Amino acid sequence: GAVVSQHPSWVICKSGTSVKIECRSLDFQATTMFWYRQFPKQSLMLMATSNEGSKATYEQGVEKDKFLINHASLTLSTLTVTSAHPEDSSFYICSARRQRGSYEQYFGPGTRLTVT
Amino acid sequence: DAKTTQPPSMDCAEGRAANLPCNHSTISGNEYVYWYRQIHSQGPQYIIHGLKNNETNEMASLIITEDRKSSTLILPHATLRDTAVYYCIASHYGQNFVFGPGTRLSVLP
């Protein structure tokens, strides 16, 4: 299967600071990447769809000014959590979608964010 | 995209086949069925997908009913490492994945 990496795998930051998470597709080009959030004992929830070279599309209830997404190349998307608060603590997971065939998504290993 | 429903949990004996069902009665003609699994604190792992025909790969088999309203994921010889939450998703071309609660599969020694 295809490989998607995320960096960092975990991060602890103070309330009010910003944190950037990188998502890379290592062995295929992805015009579309997705960002999900997962709280403990819950399922993944889609936050936004990131398209290379254009603005991200955010799901209802997700603040676009708080969760900044940049998809500057076919292999890299970044999520920046601005002015983080303790309630933003969560497991953030990205995925990259194949452009051809049946368009399956491949997921990164996730980033655990803890805001103190 | 169509909603899917799965049983919340299942047990399977090690070495036996694990059959995980999924209902997607409102699936449309061009929606694929995708299966993923998630082991604790990791990103979901792709398993298999299909549109109409049954599919098999090195990990699993996917059986889709003729009316496409349900499917079954089959792990032919379950091992302890197959213990995970399994998600069934119906989607147009891999867009807008909606993750339900999935099925928590426990493989027992």
Image (spheres, rainbow, N blue to C red):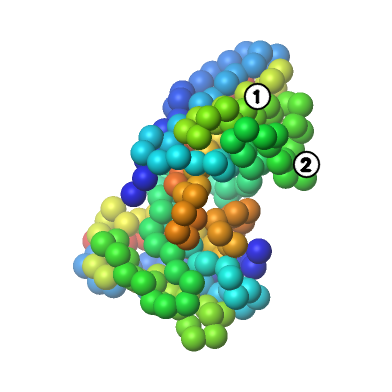
Sequence-wise first label, 2 or 1: 2
Chain assignment, label 1 = A
State how far apart marks 2 and 1 are (Cα): 15 Å
**Quadrant in the picture for the C terminus of chain A:** top right
- Residue A96 is situated, as x and y percent measured from the top left of the image, at 49, 43
Q: Look at the picture and state if A49 lies above or below B105.
A: above
- Residue A22 is situated, as x and y percent measured from the top left of the image, at 51, 26
Q: Look at the picture and state if B38 lies above or below B76.
A: above
Q: Residue at x 62, y 33 (%)?
A: A53
Amino acid, disc 1: Val
Asked whether residue B4 appears in the rendered view, the answer is yes
The quadrant in which residue A115 appears is top right
- Residue A48 is situated, as x and y percent measured from the top left of the image, at 66, 41
The quadrant in which residue B12 appears is bottom left
Asked whether residue B13 appears in the rendered view, the answer is no
Q: Residue at x 30, y 65 (%)?
A: B57
- Mark 2, residues whose alpha carbon is within 10 Å: few (<14), some, or many (≥20)? few
- Mark 1, residues whose alpha carbon is within 10 Å: few (<14), some, or many (≥20)? many
**In the image, are marks 2 and 1 on the same chain?**
yes
Which residue lies most toward the bottom here? B66
- Residue B67 is situated, as x and y percent measured from the top left of the image, at 54, 85
Q: What is the secondary structure assignment of the residue under circle 2?
A: loop
Horizontal side of B14 relative to B2 (left or right) equals left
Q: Which mark is residue A81?
A: 1
Q: Look at the picture and state if B90 lies above or below A113.
A: below
Q: Residue at x 27, y 56 (%)?
A: B80
Q: Which residue is mark 2?
A: A61
Residue nearer the viewer, B108 or B21: B21
Amino acid, disc 2: Gly
Do callouts 2 and 1 mark residues in contact (Cβ within 8 Å)? no
Chain assignment, label 2 = A
